[in-house]
Amino acid sequence: MLDRNSPVPLYYQLSEILMARITAGDFKPGDLMPAERELMETYAVSRITVRAAVEELVKRGFVRREQGRGTFVASPRVQRGGPTLTSFTEDIVSRGFRPGSRLLALKREPATGRIASELRIPEGTLVWFVERLRLADDAPIALNLSYLNLPPNVELSREELESEVSLWNLLRSKGIRMAQADKSIEAIPADEWEASLLGVRKNAPLLLIEGVVWDAQGDAVEFHRIIARADRYKYYVHAERLE
């Protein structure tokens, strides 16, 4: 119930109540949220309070608005990160989603500038470029661009990448095992291409995750750029203080 004597604003209290009901499963992903009038009557609050509460839920990724249709419960975000190095596919499966991938590009090209620097190879070295649209339950969630420095005897084919969802699984089958990675995360606005692929509006907030992955021998194998929907993705960070 709302505590009208609390210093916590009513809209925030209401957003917490609705968030708890979503988390408890009273409202499931894809459900239409109650109309403003229903929430006003149920909780005896003003329209301004209801709208502010719903806006808070939108900002926190619990609901989404669809123009002309209403406000719907959003799908849970895919959580990534932590002390263990895991692939996109492993994270998707662990959260109860069905992983998918659509291959957009596969080619070999000379490494230039930053790509060569990140992979610690001379400029002009041929690397594999793999561009994929990553899916969770058939919904687009991230654009994945991978630059791979592979041994000369290792080849990649469209058939392999279209049949194997996990790039790391495919590389493992070829004797390449990922061992450690460094990543950086920043917020960026969606350009027209990214927006069209990910099903968001232009300039919508996205997460840009860049990273280098090394194999067990300490060689840089992959430099990747992952452009993810901020409303479907969150990163988890574990840290310990050293005294």
Image (cartoon, rainbow, N blue to C red):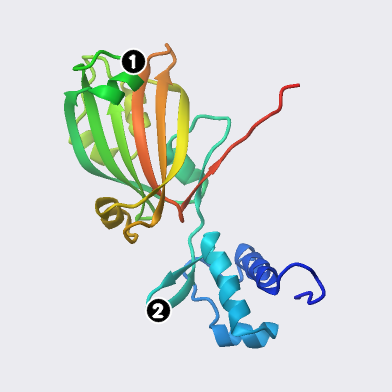
Mark 2 to mark 1 CA distance (whole Å): 51 Å
The amino acid type of the residue labelled 1 equals Arg
Where on the picture, by quarter, is residue 176? top left
Which secondary structure, mark 2?
A: loop
Locate residue 51, reporting x and y percent. 56, 76
Q: Is residue 126 above or below residue 195?
A: above
Q: Is residue 106 above or below residue 104?
A: above
Q: Is residue 32 above or below residue 37?
A: above
Locate residue 69, reporting x and y percent. 40, 79
Mark identifier at residue 120? 1
Residue matched to label 2: 69
Quadrant location of the C terminus in the rendered image: top right
Which numbered disc flags the more N-terminal residue, 2 or 1?
A: 2
Mark identifier at residue 49? none
Locate residue 158, reporting x and y percent. 19, 36
160 lies left or right of 201: left
